[in-house]
Amino acid sequence: MFAKTRSDPVVVPDDAIISIRGVTKQFGSHRVLEDVTYDVPRGKTTAILGPSGTGKSVMLKVIIGLLRPEAGQIYVDGDPVVGVSEKELLRIRRKFGVLFQDGALFGSMSLYDNIAFPLREHTKASEREIRVKVMEKAELVGLVAHLKKLPGEVSGGMKKRAGLARALVLDPEIILFDEPDSGLDPVRVAYLDELVNTAQAETGATFFIITHNIESVNRTAHYMGLLFRSKLVAFGPKEEMNAMDNPVVRQFFAGRARGPISMDEMAEGDSEDSGPAPASPGGGQAEPVGVSGD
Ligand SMILES: Nc1ncnc2c1ncn2[C@@H]1O[C@H](COP(=O)(O)OP(=O)(O)O)[C@@H](O)[C@H]1O
Ligand SMILES: [Mg+2]
C-alpha cells in the first residue's frame, strides 16, 4: 500500500529535498516511530530533536534505506526509498554524506587519507584531483595543518572536523549528522556549530541533524522537529518552534524536569548500533575510532 515504485506519481512540495510520509518503524512489538510525516527543506539546516531512545538514529537509517519501515514512504528528490532495488538505493545514497556519532574514522589512516577515502572508493579521481578536493575540504574545516596525523593523535573536536570534511568530500546534496555534539565539551560544540553554519552557507547543501542538544541546534537549524513517544510532536521553522505552546515542546526546549517528559525518557541509555554504515559514502567499515573527549 505505501511502498510505491518509481512509476507511481509523487507529490512533493517544491522546496522539499526529503519527504517523510506516514513512516512507522517497529522492532517486534516495540513501535519506535509511528506515522511520522514531514518535509526537509532543500538547502537549509533541519534538526530533529528528541529524548535519547526516541528513534532519532532509526529515523536516519530509514531515510538512507538501511532500515525498512513497516509503513510509509520516504522520497529523496522525489524518488522513493522504500521498496526499491539495492542498485537504486545505492544511487540514492550517493546524494548523502554522513557524519556518524563517533566520527567513524579509520584509526590506521592519516586524516588526509580518511578524508580522501570516499574519493578513492567511489570515484576514479587521480591522486592530483583527490589532493585538490581534500585540501579544499580541509581548509573549510580548518585542518590543513593536521592532515598527516592519525585520528588517535588529535582531539575529539578535530576528529569531528575530519569526519565532516570526509562527509563533504563527494559534494553531496545532503549531509546527515547523528548527534554531532556527542563527546564534545560545550565550547567545542559551539565551535563545531560555527563550522556547521559556515559549511552549510558555503556548500548550499541540505544539512539534517538529529540530536537532543537544543542549545546547539538553536545556533544552527532553520527548521526543527520534535520526536516524543514515537510521534512527531511538532515541526516548523525554529522561531515558531521556540514560540510554541505545546507542553512537550516547551519542556524539551527549556530543558525542564517538570512536564510530560518523564525521567526515564530523558535517560542517557543509548542506542547500540551507532557505528558506521557500510553502504554510505562517508562511512567506513574498519576500526572506527570513537570520540571520547580529548
Ligand atoms: N536494530 C534494532 N533492533 C531492535 N531495536 C532497535 C534497533 N535499533 C534501535 N532499536 C531500538 O529503537 C529505539 C530507538 O533507538 P534510537 O533510534 O537509536 O534512539 P535515539 O533517539 O537515541 O537515536 C531504542 O529503544 C532502541 O533500542
Ligand atoms: Mg541515536
Image: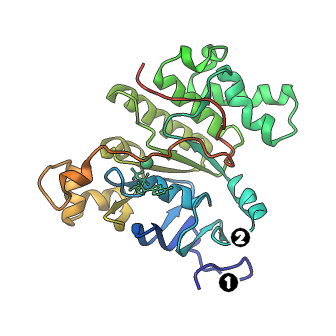
Q: Which of 219 and 282 is in front in this view?
A: 282
**Could you tell me which residue is drawn at 48 percent across and 68 percent down?**
25
Q: Residue furthest front?
A: 28
- Percent coordinates x, y for residue 270 in the rendering: 37, 45
Are there few (<14), some (14-19), or many (20+) residues within 10 Å of tag 1? few
- Percent coordinates x, y for residue 71 in the rendering: 52, 76
289 left or right of 226 in image: right
- Indicate whether 167 appears above or below 158: below
- Percent coordinates x, y for residue 117 in the rendering: 73, 32
The label on residue 233 is: none
Find residue 243 and report its image quarter: bottom left
233 left or right of 8 in image: left
Q: What residue type is labelled 2?
A: Val
**Could you tell me which residue is drawn at 26 percent across and 54 percent down?**
265
What is the quadrant of the N terminus in the image? bottom right
- Indicate whether 171 appears above or below 291: below
- Indicate whether 209 appears above or below 192: below
- Observer able to see residue 262: yes
Q: What secondary structure is found at the residue carrying circle 2?
A: loop
User: Mark 2 and mark 1: span between their CA atoms?
Assistant: 15 Å
**Could you tell me which residue is drawn at 56 percent across and 23 percent down?**
142
Find residue 140 and report its image quarter: top right
The label on residue 84 is: 2
Q: What residue type is labelled 1?
A: Pro
- Give the image's coloring scheme: rainbow
What is the quadrant of the C terminus in the image? top left
Identify the residue under disc 1: 9
The picture quadrant for ligand 1 comes to bottom left
Q: Nearer the viewer, residue 90 or 94?
A: 90
Q: Which residue lies furthest to the left in this view?
A: 258
Mark 2 or mark 1: name the one nearer the start of the chain: 1
- Percent coordinates x, y for residue 293 in the rendering: 40, 23
